[in-house]
Image: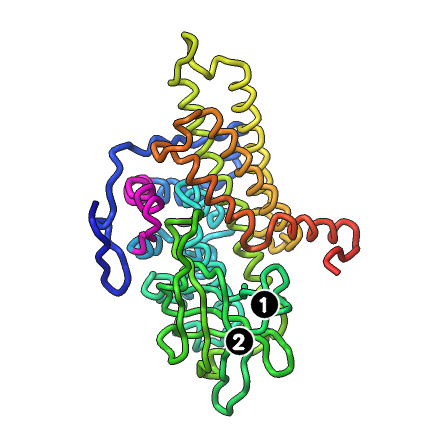
């Protein structure tokens, strides 16, 4: 097995064992949802699928088994337009619409949730808030390099003692004349150990939540990696620690001074997850369907047994419902009409759907389902993180409950 060699903390393709098993995935579209997509949506999806099959599928199991993030893929993700697909081209994005963003995230997560996390953090949680809230100079300084994969970013909101309740954050900034002094810590931050910059949310001296761009080489900034994960093992996760970090005032977002700032970023990312989870479900279903046609027991393929057919029929039904939900959410997002509550419903439903399908697919594969010859257990473990991050399953349920009843169940 090759050892990891890095340049500037980045891996190379040669660092990973190449799988001899080809990626045999075939797209499944039981209700003809593709008819609702534009040609550019399908072209973007197919281009990402081709790249994934050539560059990621051969190494993803080795990366996950060893718990090593294939950081060399950041450049490839940039080249296929996975960073900020729906942001304007002049600001480093792809200039496409929200459905294109969704289908790209779906194809990435079809391979691995960690791969989609690498892309969605960069685009939705780093590029989007800089585009939305930063001054023009800051946009021009960072966005083109983020879009090109020359800079890697991360998003600092969650803290060791502040997860589902971001209003209780303790990270803070204090005015020091021509700059702010930032202190505090963030936890469970995708990309942080390899990031060049972080979009950080902290309270000012008036208790207002402020966003800012913090460069990782500044004195007092550290990002220790979190080890020992059983989930998202091919994605790098860490902390952010700020010890009297000097932040130039021009790097602080001038106008947003509330939780509306970070929550708007989370809506953007949650929308991508609603699409992405379908990809993981499709991969599990595709593998289970093929296995049921090839695996013989009692003299016939196990797909001929009624209980196996029941599992597969229910799986494709739930996938189809999720595809239609995501498409409708995308059409609303394109019109600027998708509400945070609708996005929460999409994220919660589709991730839960994908988890259930992964579990059923594991049953169809029998004992082989726990091996890395098939992607099932990797998807299942990854989805256990996805169902929790960027709003837990229960938190999204409360968001929907509050929206339909008008009563705040959080208080």
Looking at the picture, how far across and down is residue 178, in whole percent? 48, 90
Depicted 8 relative to depicted 338: above or below: below
Magenta segment range?
50-71
Q: Residues within 10 Å of mark 1 (few under 14, many from 20)?
A: some
The mark found on residue 188 in the picture is none
Looking at the picture, how far across and down is residue 328, in whole percent? 60, 43
Labels in figure, total: 2
Q: Secondary structure at mark 1?
A: helix
Does the segment drawn in magenta span residue 55?
yes
Residue lying farthest to the front in this orientation: 228
Looking at the picture, how far across and down is residue 296, in whole percent? 39, 14
Quadrant in the picture for residue 353: top right
Depicted 327 relative to depicted 78: above or below: above
Residue 51 seen by the camera: no
Nearer to the camera, 268 or 371? 371
Query: Which residue is found at the position 74% from the left and 53% from the top?
Result: 402
Residue 94 seen by the camera: yes
CA–CA distance in space, label 2 to label 1? 10 Å
**Is residue 195 left or right of 344 when viewed as pictured?**
left
Disc 1 marks which residue? 261
Nearer to the camera, 410 or 1? 1
Quadrant in the picture for residue 368: top left
Disc 2 marks which residue? 253
Query: Which residue is found at the position 49% from the left and 84% from the top?
Result: 181
**Is residue 120 left or right of 72 when viewed as pictured?**
right
Q: Quadrant of the C terminus?
A: bottom right
Q: Secondary structure at mark 2?
A: loop
Mark 2 and mark 1 in contact? Answer it, CB < 8 Å.
yes
Does the segment drawn in magenta span residue 14?
no
Report the predominant secondary structure element of the magenta stretch.
Answer: helix
Query: Which residue is found at the position 64% from the left and 55% from the top?
Result: 340
């Amino acid at each position: 097995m090759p050892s990891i060699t890095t340049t500037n903390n980045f891996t190379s393709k040669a660092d990973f064992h190449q799988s001899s098993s080809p990626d045999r995935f075939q797209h499944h579209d039981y209700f003809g949802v593709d008819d609702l997509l534009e040609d550019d949506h399908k072209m973007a999806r197919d281009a990402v699928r081709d790249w994934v099959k050539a560059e990621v599928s051969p190494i993803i199991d080795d990366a996950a088994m060893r718990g090593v993030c294939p950081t060399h893929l950041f450049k490839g993700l940039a080249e296929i337009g996975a960073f900020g697909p729906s942001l304007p081209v002049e600001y480093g994005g792809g200039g496409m619409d929200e459905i294109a963003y969704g289908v790209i995230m779906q194809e990435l997560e079809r391979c691995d949730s960690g791969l989609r996390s690498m892309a969605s953090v960069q685009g939705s949680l780093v590029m989007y808030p800089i585009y939305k809230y930063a001054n023009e100079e800051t946009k021009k300084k960072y966005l083109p390099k983020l879009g090109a994969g020359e800079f890697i970013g991360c998003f600092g909101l969650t803290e060791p003692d502040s997860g589902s309740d971001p209003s209780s954050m303790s990270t803070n900034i204090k005015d020091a004349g021509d700059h702010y002094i930032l202190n505090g810590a963030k936890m469970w931050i995708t990309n942080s150990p390899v990031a060049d910059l972080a979009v950080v949310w902290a309270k000012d001296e008036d208790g207002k939540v402020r966003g800012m761009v913090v460069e990782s080489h500044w004195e007092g900034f550290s990002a220790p990696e979190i080890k020992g994960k059983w989930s998202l093992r091919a994605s790098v996760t860490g902390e952010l620690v700020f010890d009297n970090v000097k932040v130039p005032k021009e790097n602080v977002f001038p106008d947003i001074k509330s939780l509306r700032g970070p929550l708007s970023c989370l809506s953007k990312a949650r929308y991508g997850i609603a699409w992405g989870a379908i990809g993981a479900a499709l991969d599990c279903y595709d593998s289970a369907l093929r296995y049921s046609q090839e695996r013989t027991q009692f003299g016939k393929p196990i797909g001929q047994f009624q209980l196996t057919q029941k599992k597969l029929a229910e799986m494709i039904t739930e996938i189809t419902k999720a595809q239609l939900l995501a498409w409708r959410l995308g059409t609303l997002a394109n019109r600027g009409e998708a509400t945070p509550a609708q996005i929460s419903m999409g994220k919660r439903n589709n991730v839960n759907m994908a988890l259930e399908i992964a579990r059923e697919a594991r049953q169809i594969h029998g004992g082989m389902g726990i091996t890395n010859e098939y992607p099932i257990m990797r998807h299942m473990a990854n989805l256990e993180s996805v169902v929790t991050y960027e709003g837990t399953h229960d938190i999204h349920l409360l968001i929907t409950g509050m929206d339909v009843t008008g009563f705040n169940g959080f208080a």
